[in-house]
């Protein structure tokens, strides 16, 4: 049998010049960790300075130092909860005071936990809607006047799990569907001002908290249930890497994408076409102890 193909993880600097974002400024919510931190690093490697926004100032400060050291550009932290419009406006003021402009915005701050509707309180549902959907709206409101000046671009970090029903993800599915819709309207309302708006929809990305929480070992399946599922449902031979998402962000912000707006770009190695539930169905619904044994508690 022919060996299975495994897509290489490459760095965007192997494809795009390191100067394409010289003089540009990125404003990234959720940039203190995970996928958004790597997206920020990639955009900085092509010349941009950045502001990363989040709730935990200690983590942001450490990440900003790491990003500055790794790229030779300047990253500053700005503490804000995206549910609070005033805090976001202050973060934007900090960006303008420091850099004088904002060219790119990543709306990436998000909240997630696994819960069936039957176990989800009204406040639990509302919390994720407020972080993901309202947080995106609030970020757009605070930044759009500045992007009109620079004719800038937005990337919203969404998901693929709402394309078909995903158990335990009602709150996130509703929130991300709304983010996709917001981005499309933003694209048509602000296109005439020169602003573009697109969505990146990551599939399963290894090394993220969400992925790691689903990777608890089942004594009967030492490899872990979720790894077994992904072994047979990833056409390009592996789960995603944060760099795959970062590469897509560099492309979408670049002039090579200057006629692309109002789109949703799944970056999932083709997984959506084969996607199976990441927990055994319907066992995970009917046997909550079995489901719990497959999910690691909050990290
Ligand atoms: C049911 C839950 C819950 C859970 C919180 N809630 N966790 N309900 N199951 N596991 C409910 C609470 O009971 C509360 O409702 C309401 O949500 C608000 O919770 P708080 O803790 O007060 O909110 P807050 O401090 O603002 O935290 C927001 C958060 C939290 C989204 C709940 O998880 C967070 O800050 N996350 C950020 C980091 C993150 O989510 N990373 C992504 C990990 S991905 P009541 O009614 O009690 O007041 C992941 C799995 C991904 O974990 C799977 C992907 C497919």
Image (cartoon, rainbow, N blue to C red):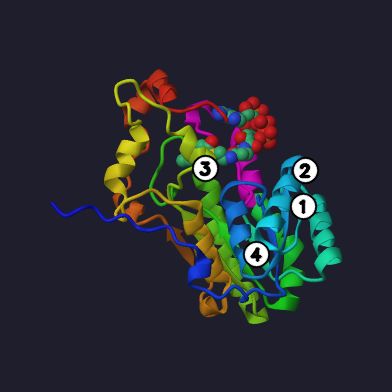
Q: Name the residue under label 1.
A: 77
Say which label, 1 or 4, has the lower sequence index: 4
Dot 1 and dot 2 residues touching (CB under 8 Å)? yes
Say which label, 4 or 3, has the lower sequence index: 4
Residue name at image x 58 percent, y 54 percent: 38
68 versus 253 height, above or below = above
Task: Tell me the quarter of the picture where residue 9 sits.
Answer: bottom left
Residue name at image x 39 percent, y 26 percent: 217
Q: At which x and y percent is residue 85?
A: 78, 52
Mark 1–mark 4 Cα distance, whole angstroms, equals 14 Å
Mark 4–mark 3 Cα distance, whole angstroms, equals 21 Å
Dot 4, crowdedness within 10 Å: few (<14), some or many (≥20)? many
Bounds of the magenta segment: 108-133
Q: Mark 3 points at which residue?
A: 208
SS at circle 2: helix
Say which label, 1 or 2, has the lower sequence index: 2
Task: Tell me the quarter of the picture where residue 221 sits.
Answer: top left
User: Which mark lies nearer to you, 4 or 3?
Assistant: 4
Dot 2, crowdedness within 10 Å: few (<14), some or many (≥20)? some
Q: Name the mark on residue 44.
A: 4
| Front residue (pair 271, 34) | 34
């Amino acid at each position: 049998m022919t060996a299975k193909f495994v897509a290489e993880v490459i760095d965007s600097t192997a494809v795009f010049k390191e100067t394409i974002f010289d003089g540009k400024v990125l404003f990234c919510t959720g940039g203190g960790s995970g996928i958004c931190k790597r997206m920020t690093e990639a955009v900085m490697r092509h010349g941009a300075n950045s502001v990363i926004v989040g709730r935990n100032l200690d983590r942001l400060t450490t990440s900003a130092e790491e990003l500055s050291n790794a790229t030779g550009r300047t990253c500053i932290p700005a503490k804000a909860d995206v549910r609070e419009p005033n805090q976001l406006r202050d973060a934007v003021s900090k960006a303008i005071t420091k850099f004088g402009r904002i060219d790119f915005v990543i709306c990436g701050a998000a909240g997630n936990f696994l819960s069936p509707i039957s176990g989800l309180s009204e406040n639990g549902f509302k919390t994720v809607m407020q972080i993901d959907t309202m947080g995106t709206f609030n970020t757009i409101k605070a930044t759009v006047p500045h992007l009109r000046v620079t004719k800038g671009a937005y990337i919203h970090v969404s998901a693929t799990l709402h394309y078909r029903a995903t158990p335990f993800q009602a709150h996130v599915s509703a929130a991300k569907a709304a983010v996709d819709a917001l981005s499309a309207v933003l694209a048509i309302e602000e296109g005439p001002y020169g602003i573009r708006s697109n969505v990146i929809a990551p599939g399963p990305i290894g090394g993220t908290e969400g992925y790691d929480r689903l990777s608890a070992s089942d004594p009967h399946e030492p490899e872990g249930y979720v790894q077994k599922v992904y072994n047979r449902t990833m056409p390009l031979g592996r789960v995603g890497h944060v760099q795959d998402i970062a590469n897509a962000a560099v492309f979408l912000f670049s002039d090579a994408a200057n006629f692309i707006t109002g789109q949703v770009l799944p970056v999932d190695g083709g997984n959506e076409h084969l996607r199976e539930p990441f927990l055994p169905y319907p066992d995970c619904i009917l046997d909550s102890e079995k489901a719990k044994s497959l999910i690691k508690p909050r990290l």
